[in-house]
Image (spheres, rainbow, N blue to C red):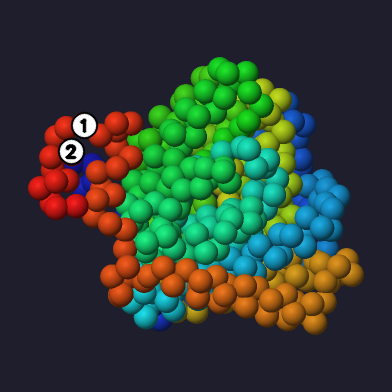
Amino acid sequence: MNEYAPLRLHVPEPTGRPGCQTDFSYLRLNDAGQVRKPPIDVEPADTADLSSSLIRVLDGEGNALGPWAADIDPQVLRQGMRAMLKTRIFDSRMVVAQRQKKMSFYMQSLGEEAIGTAQALALNRTDMCFPTYRQQSILMARDVSLVEMICQLLSNERDPLKGRQLPIMYSVREAGFFTISGNLATQFVQAVGWAMASAIKGDTKIASAWIGDGATAESDFHTALTFAHVYRAPVILNVVNNQWAISTFQAIAGGESTTFAGRGVGCGIASLRVDGNDFLAVYAASRWATERARRGLGPTLIEWVTYRAGPHSTSDDPSKYRPADEWRHFPLGDPIARLKQHLVTLGQWSEQEHQAVTAELEAEVIAAQKAAEQFGTLSNGLIPSAASMFEDVYKEMPDHLRRQRQELGI
């Protein structure tokens, strides 16, 4: 007789589906202030406990606790609040514009605003970010023109990318924002290569790369970790674990019995797992990783635990695969509400100021949208000339492209 039962594969399943409230105990949370802060020059292997615990600073009453609660200039906190509010307002209006058929597509960062904002404020503007399609808060924190951003979304005559990129795939070199790629995980290898080049040149600039939890299943993720470890590239490797890769739960990419940060330790990279909805924790961890990279101590991998509160994109209906009210039950809360509570506790913010700033930023976004729409929207045909497809490919246009352009009569 065969003593073995038939073999079976394990297929991870989320703890909540439509009509069934999610059990978030899988997140493995820690109380605020509980996780230690190691020295900058810590050995990667000695961060194993930090890759499985969760670094948090803000408690439920808005108090900053523990070793990661470094003194932060209140102006930085206020700047962060404004950038997060602007991001949320911008996202909301652009989703409406997409529904009005003014653009083809949009992806919002609802619930994730603290991650890009706080890290952008921790970096220098000359450092290069290699983002995915949900880090528009970096651009907000760096005060990039809203009109230019919206023109890119509308693919109109003023689109700085001349209609060659999908909406939300910005490219702003002067703001340290590398061209977004729609292919998953390419950002990691690009950032590591850029960081290696910076070190080869003897520069002091570092790189910051961003991918989602689902993209860690791509081979580029593992290749980037190998190069970053071997050459001690001055790079921060950000994994945004927002629980869902389109409609696939994060456990499918390997986040069930281990953490994404744990993969960094296994590759010889200092790794942290951080509450991504805690602005102070994000800022502190980003400053730690930035200092480590700039001092030539090597890369840091950071897993940001957060939640994608909205659909994956305007083409997605998340009610088909998760509870409709799941975000309301997410134990890490709303990053804007949490920072607001902390600022109020410090006496640096009030409900009146919050309302006033919100109104001010709404007016700014509305004005920028009106200005951008004067150069065209998807529905009115004011788009870059077809002739532009032949430009910017070669330094000097070769004869065969000249002939093709002439054949088109443009």
Question: Does residue 4 appear to the left or right of 358 in the view shown?
Answer: left
> How crowded is the residue under tag 1: few (<14 C-alpha within 10 Å), some, or many (20+)?
few
Q: Nearer the viewer, residue 390 or 287?
A: 390
Disc 1 secondary structure class: loop
Q: Quadrant of residue 58?
A: bottom right
Q: Is residue 89 above or below residue 64?
A: below
Q: Quadrant of residue 379?
A: bottom left
Q: Position of residue 210 (x, y in %)?
A: 50, 45
Gap between marks 1 and 2 measured at Cα: 6 Å
Residue visible at 47% across and 68% down?
372
Q: Is residue 51 above or below residue 199?
A: below
Question: Does residue 399 appear to the left or right of 121 in the view shown?
Answer: left
Residue on which the image places disc 1: 398
Residue visible at 58% across and 66% down?
87
Residue visible at 74% across and 31% down?
40
Q: Nearer the viewer, residue 368 or 138?
A: 368
Q: Amino acid at mark 1?
A: Pro
Q: Position of residue 309 (x, y in %)?
A: 51, 69
Residue on which the image places disc 2: 401
Disc 2 secondary structure class: helix
Q: Position of residue 362 (x, y in %)?
A: 62, 77
Q: Amino acid at mark 2?
A: Leu
